[in-house]
Amino acid sequence: MKRTISMSLVILILISVLVGCERKPEYTKYSDSFFDTFDTITQVVAYAKDEEEFKIYMDKIHNRFIELHKLYDKYNTYEGINNIKTINDNAGIKPVKVDKEIIDLISFSKEWYYKSGEKTNIAVGKVIEIWNQYRDKAEGNPDNAELPPMDDLKDASKYIDMEKIIVDEENSTVYLEDPNMSLDVGSVAKGYATELVAKEMEEEGLKSALISAGGNIRAIGKPLDNIRERWGVGIQNPDKSLIETGNVLDTIFITDASVVSSGDYQRYYIVNDKVYHHIIDPDTLMPGDHYRAVTIVTPDSGLADFLSTSVFLLPFKDSKELVASLDDVEAMWVMKDGTVVATEGMKKIMLSEGATGAKRK
């Protein structure tokens, strides 16, 4: 009898402990942000044992983003660093010895260029420069906004051959064979950097976080709040700004995955009441005009960033076929008329289709 009572007490104590753990999570949610890398705001939400631990991770994340920003920068020179600008400055002159992070990014971009429809072209720098010049002028004087002359764009397009980017992995050098070439890694750099940072922080011991670098979102683990199994990520409505009511088109739920969107609502200017955005098709030399937006979900943030451009620039038949041909890649398209089309795998994680982030019962 005494033994039975004792065992009952032990069970009751264990239940109490378990319930207590359920009510009082071991981890607390913290958040912070910075605005000094990749020309965007980077936000971090993470679960840590205490604020000191979170600050240690946050400092590491921030410092690593600064390093990668400098390496992938095409505009600025930094003492003691060979970066994308250094490569461009030495086009047609000599190979440039660079860090592994640049070698890997360029090799990745060349590989996926051929695997994804030859639309996301990091050699298109000369064309992008022209569009940027006209967009900058329009921002300063919108009443006199103009389109770049097609003759200028066609001339620049003579120097966008991906085959003329020579990567020597053994010697860790990159050489642009054409002296008129210019690299622009804006279509992939933020996502690629986000993936590098996320993996490195996981190796450091970070178990639960959401890193968002200008909308390039990477989830590490799941929220450690004893409530949710998945993070909820809002997808922006292309018709609404971030500060407007109703700016979330849908919410998708992820764990250990990345979400990246590309759309005509991000960076643009207006000429004769028509919007001209920043995602330039290397074939037409004009902004892609098939969709309002696309969203990609896949484990790797660099791939998600790269594919979001490719999927956005391809006609729907080709775009859909590309996504279907790839493992662990889901997509959502917002068509020009506002209609939303999604892959079956994407539907399973969309709030509008009944998905939630709650623990499964």
Image (cartoon, rainbow, N blue to C red):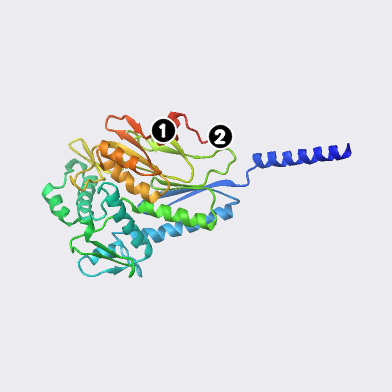
Give x and y (percent) for residue 96: 29, 68
The residue nearer to you, when weighing 277 against 173, is 173
Residue farthest to the left, as pictured = 151
- Which of the 4 image quarters holds residue 67? bottom left
Q: Position of residue 290 (x, y in %)?
A: 25, 37
Q: Can residue 360 be seen in this view?
A: yes
Quadrant of the image occupied by residue 182: bottom left
* Residue displayed at 38% across by 47% down: 214
The amino acid type, in three-letter code, at marker 1 is Lys
Towards the viewer: 63 or 340: 340
How far, Cα to Cα, is label 1 from label 2? 17 Å
* In-image side of 328 versus 179 (left or right): right
**Mark 1 / mark 2, whichever is N-terminal:** 1
Reading the image, the residue beneath label 1 is: 347
Residue 153 appears left or right of 205: left
Image height check: is 58 above or below 174? above
What residue did someone put label 2 on? 360
* Disc 2: CA contacts within 10 A as few (<14), some (14-19) or many (>=20): few
Image spot of residue 142 (x, y percent)? 21, 42
Quarter the N terminus occupies: top right
Q: How many labels does the image show?
A: 2
Q: Which residue is drawn at 29% across and 41% down?
A: 312
Which picture quadrant has residue 237?
A: top left
Query: Which type of secondary structure does the marked residue at label 1 adopt?
Result: helix
User: Label 2 near label 1: C-beta < 8 Å?
Assistant: no
Identity of the amino acid at label 2?
A: Arg
